Image: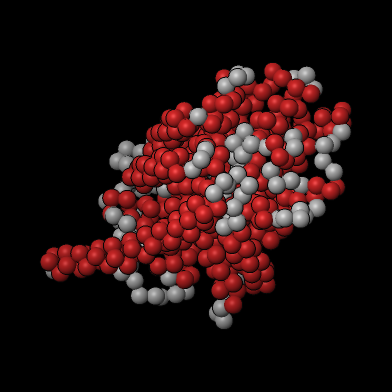
């Protein structure tokens, strides 16, 4: 473990005396549903499926070389370093304080971009609940902004009230995800038997110009993250050493099967050139339901899918807010970020800051881009880059642990850790690099590259500022206060 010199020293798994303690309210069922709702994100599926049948091969490669190693990493690192913080704590323990802070910072700030995409997707789907003729509202910027802010506000309030309350949004979202996915795939099976498939073997070939497909590999890796989310809330899990491994296994298997089945169904239902990144799932259900004479099913399906999306937003908002909470305890962010609500024992300052920045980013992107779909794709691509940076540390930690001369057996053998770490590390690097290739929804290449490179540098630069500048000032004030007291 690295003992790099740092601005301050703190143990993030133990809040300072006098603060409220987090409550252990998450059981195995809660975790499995949390994993499904966090990993199986229907909102990223249309932007991936829009690249055609070749994405099935990308799914299989990502499941084997990224998702499976991710499950091993989560179980192993949570076993070795239990406690609140997850990717923040693991990178800190293995590589040192700055790397822990950078890992946690990227994990948190990526969700400032990702949660807005969830809100926009919610708007795109929820308009179908209103009935036919309201679909165009999803492309109306003022309406999309107002509805995004409304849902964001509800999720913040529920998560401030605590995971005991907020987990039910996650659980409802998980149930909604299951029902929506099985309804989508069930309609696909019926349509296939009655009318045949609209896709052919040629659709699974690599296209002559694969540039637009390259971006989808990064998005697929991004879509497969989420197994680490529960470990960020390690102090809020009932008996984590016993509960977590089984929940990770079940959540991972279910999510992988749902992703491949739903992608195939989407491609069967509608042409890849007609898939909307915001409304593709509902488009597919509408088309298939009309074919089999069950058009009435569209509004109930849109309602279920809206529940699923709300659960996704709640899971990532609530989970990622624990990162600035522990960083506040470590004094790398303002101390008030490490405060808990006096009544609900939740990190409410972090939740409020997250919601505020997410809203500002949506507003900025609406003003800077040509439309809601382009804004969605731009936010999603930058979120991919920031989200995958912590996974460089996570997989790197497995390699470092396996190569340590004083290796101590944890949950897995040395060879398993080495293979999973190397495989995940290479795949993650590839996913980050390919996210810089523009998707087909992007209209301006120059604006997209400026957003991607500029955004990445800004967020990493802010991490360095808070750690080295703010953290050192905080440490100096603590030393001065200690000297005065002595």
Q: Is residue 268 visible?
A: yes
Q: Position of residue 272 (x, y in %)?
A: 72, 40
Q: Is residue 183 left or right of residue 452?
A: right
Residue 323 x %, y %? 42, 53
> Quick check: can you spot residue 42?
no
Please tell me which residue is depicted at 41% across the width and 43% down the height of the picture. Answer: 364
Q: Position of residue 93 (x, y in %)?
A: 45, 68
Residue under the point 80% across and 22% down: 292
Q: Along the horizontal axis of the image, is 446 left or right of 348?
A: right
- The quarter in which the C terminus is drawn is bottom left
Colour scheme employed for the rendering of this structure: secondary structure
Choose top left, top right, bottom left or bottom right for residue 195. top right
**Horizontal and vertical percent position of residue 303:** 59, 25
> Residue at the spot x=51%, y=40% of the render?
370
Relative horizontal placement of residue 310, taking residue 276 as reference (left or right):
left
Name the residue at the bottom extreme.
405
Q: Residue at x 42, y 48 (%)?
A: 321
Count of marks overlaid on the render = 0
Query: Nearest the camera: 175 or 467?
Result: 467
């Amino acid at each position: 473990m690295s003992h790099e010199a740092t601005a301050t020293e703190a143990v993030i798994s133990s809040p300072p005396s006098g603060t409220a303690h987090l409550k252990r309210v998450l059981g195995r069922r809660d975790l499995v549903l949390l994993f499904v709702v966090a990993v199986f994100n229907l909102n990223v599926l249309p932007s991936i499926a829009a690249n055609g049948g070749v994405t099935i091969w990308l799914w299989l490669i990502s499941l084997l070389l990224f998702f499976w190693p991710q499950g091993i990493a989560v179980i192993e690192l949570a076993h070795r370093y239990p406690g609140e913080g997850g990717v923040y704590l693991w990178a800190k323990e293995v590589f040192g304080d700055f790397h822990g802070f950078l890992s946690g910072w990227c994990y948190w700030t990526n969700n400032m971009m990702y949660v807005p995409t969830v809100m926009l997707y919610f708007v795109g789907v929820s308009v179908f609940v209103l009935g036919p003729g309201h679909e165009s509202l999803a492309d109306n910027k003022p309406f999309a902004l107002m509805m995004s802010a409304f849902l964001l506000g509800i999720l913040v309030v529920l998560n401030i009230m605590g995971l005991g309350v907020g987990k039910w949004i996650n659980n409802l979202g998980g149930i909604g995800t299951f029902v929506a996915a099985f309804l989508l795939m069930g309609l696909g099976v019926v349509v296939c038997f009655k009318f045949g498939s609209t896709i052919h073997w040629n659709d699974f070939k690599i296209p002559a110009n694969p540039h637009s497909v390259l971006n989808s590999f990064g998005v697929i890796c991004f879509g497969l993250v989420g197994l680490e989310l529960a470990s960020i809330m390690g102090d809020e899990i009932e008996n984590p050493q016993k509960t977590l491994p089984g929940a990770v296994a079940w959540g991972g298997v279910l999510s992988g099967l749902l992703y491949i089945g739903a992608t195939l169904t989407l491609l069967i239902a509608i042409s890849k050139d007609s898939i909307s990144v915001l409304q593709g799932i509902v488009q597919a259900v509408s088309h298939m339901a009309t074919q089999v004479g069950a058009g009435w099913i569209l509004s109930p399906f849109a309602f279920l899918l809206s529940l699923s999306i709300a659960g996704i937003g709640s899971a990532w908002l609530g989970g990622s807010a624990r990162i600035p909470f522990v960083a506040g305890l470590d004094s790398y962010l303002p101390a008030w970020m490490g405060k808990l609500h006096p009544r609900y024992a939740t990190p409410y300052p972090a939740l409020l800051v997250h919601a505020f920045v997410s809203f500002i980013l949506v507003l900025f992107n609406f003003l800077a881009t040509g439309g809601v779909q382009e804004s969605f794709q731009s936010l999603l691509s930058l979120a991919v880059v920031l989200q995958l940076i912590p996974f460089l540390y996570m997989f790197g930690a497995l390699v470092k642990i396996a190569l340590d001369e004083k290796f101590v057996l944890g949950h897995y053998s040395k060879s398993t850790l080495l293979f999973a770490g190397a495989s995940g590390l290479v795949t993650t690097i590839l996913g980050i690099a390919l996210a810089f290739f523009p998707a087909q929804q992007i209209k301006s290449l120059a604006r997209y590259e400026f957003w991607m490179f500029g955004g990445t540098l800004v967020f990493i630069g802010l991490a360095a500022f808070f750690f080295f500048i703010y953290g050192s000032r905080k440490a100096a004030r603590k030393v001065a206060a200690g000297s005065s007291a002595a």
